[in-house]
Image (tube, coloured by chain):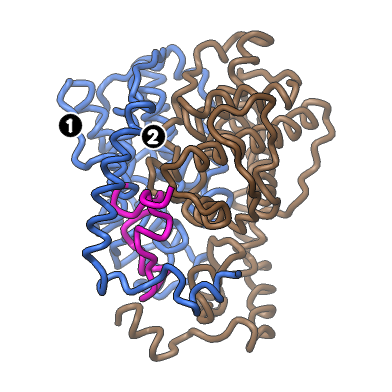
Chain colours: A blue, B brown
Amino acid sequence: MDEKTVAENGYSRRSFLADSGKVIAGAAVASSLLTGQAKEAKAYPYSTGYKYTKLDPKEVGRITYENYFKRWCASSIVAGFVEPLRKKVGGLWKSYPIDAMRWAHGGLAGWGATCGTLNGAGAVIGLVTNNTDTAEEMVNDLAFYYSYTELPSYAPAKIIKAKIHNMTLAGTIICHISVGRWMRSEDVSFLSDARAERCARMAANIAMETAGMLNDWSDGKYKPKHKLLFNLAANGITSQNNCMDCHGQNVPGVETYSTLKK
Amino acid sequence: MDEKTVAENGYSRRSFLADSGKVIAGAAVASSLLTGQAKEAKAYPYSTGYKYTKLDPKEVGRITYENYFKRWCASSIVAGFVEPLRKKVGGLWKSYPIDAMRWAHGGLAGWGATCGTLNGAGAVIGLVTNNTDTAEEMVNDLAFYYSYTELPSYAPAKIIKAKIHNMTLAGTIICHISVGRWMRSEDVSFLSDARAERCARMAANIAMETAGMLNDWSDGKYKPKHKLLFNLAANGITSQNNCMDCHGQNVPGVETYSTLKK
């Protein structure tokens, strides 16, 4: 049975709003089972020789912005951290290749999936923090910031490519949707200077937000803003909160692949 | 004008099939402009101290599979490479934290975006190869393999979690769609042992494919199977080839955000 036939037969598909009681019940069960599975996959500490020292978020943002036009979204953020850390800390930072994550640009080599800024920032976070939950909490907070903040708000001291006029709310961490929404707002094409400028400023924003979290962590005062895996608990599958972006009015219920099933 | 209004007005939206001539014309222009922009963003070599030596893909697959149930998709692949490379090469591999990419599991901390297997494999590829295009070509080939091969085909010598029965064609690198298609085929929930088993085997498959490419590269005979950024050229935006998965019958044409515009 192909996807279209499934949709036409209404098999396990229904209006999200018409049946919200079931969703809530399903979510509660999923949440309870998730707690069980989480015991098996609990967080654990790990050692890392990549030492962090507090950085000036504005400097991290500036370096990221300036590097974007050669290195693109992921590795420009890596540069924003690794360049100052090589000077201030040295050690292993001197041997980490800044371009090791460059392939992640454009949502993985242009495939438009996860925005490369999050992969670049995540790579740095994972090298620095020494507990699997801490790294994941920071990346999760960053995904919320990316999705639900009007961006880019970064204002370069010296504009490199183009003046741009709009900020947009991505509502997702998916490159294709995020950049497409901004392109529609700005009325420009992907290959325009304006779009490159937007992604450079977006990278600077994500780098600065990351620097803020790592600085707090360095001071022992980082606290996650958002709960981990709440999407999995709510929707019964790895997911975001923008179900209708792809499913339209036919968002499958949590019971489709529900934890009630088997 | 919100997205629904745009769709109802038919603004720049149409059947993909009904107007394929324009798409081809648009793609040609995009391709030509892409060549222009590529001059600015041309590939460049970079140095890395992470030395590679040929590994047995079966061993890499086995380690990945066994690590999955603690480390999940991304870092289990990192373990599949780093554990043997620490023994065979040593050097910097000894100081690279295997869990540095663990946050990428579940399409980034459970957000269901890019499958974490590709982030884990990409992190290793980026550390090893020393040219931005080589790394990107391998990751691009890996994205094709992930999307257009019936997976998981990996058969563990000793099954850890569950017997599973089905392979599926993801048609995408997006975790949510890929795992959802398999769950429907197998008729199980996300939190089932069967689903964990599937993702562990998927990770082993991606690790083995990566090992094959890196071994070929080590012998000086790696040749990319697929062209870089062809999706960008064809669709005028970072994207995959599964437009109808989200857009249904209303796939926007390349001229929506076209290179012809400005």
What x and y, as percent, mark residue B232? 60, 63
Amino acid at pointer 1: Lys
Q: Position of residue A129 (x, y in %)?
A: 33, 23
Part of the protein shown in magenta = A233-262
Give the camera-side residue of B94 and B81.
B81
Using residue A203 as the reference point, say whether residue A191 is left or right of it.
right
Q: Residue at horizontal 48%, vertical 28%?
A: B69
Can residue A233 be seen here? The reply is yes
Q: Quadrant of residue A139?
A: top left
Residue at the left extreme, as displayed: A221
Q: How many marks?
A: 2
Q: Chain of mark 2?
A: A
Residue A255 among magenta residues = yes
Q: Secondary structure at mark 2?
A: helix
Task: Pick the residue in front: B48 or B143.
Answer: B143
Residue bearing the label numbered 1: A223
Per the picture, the main secondary structure of the magenta-coloured stretch is loop
Quadrant that contains the N terminus of chain B: bottom left
Whether marks 2 and 1 lie on the same chain: yes
Query: Magenta includes A240?
Result: yes
On the picture, is A126 further left or further right than B182?
Answer: left
Q: Which residue is mark 2?
A: A80
User: Which residue occupies 68% across, 53% down?
Assistant: B228
Vertical relation: B170 (above or below) A78: below
Q: Residue at x 65, y 55 (%)?
A: B169
**Closer to viewer: mark 2 or mark 1:** 1
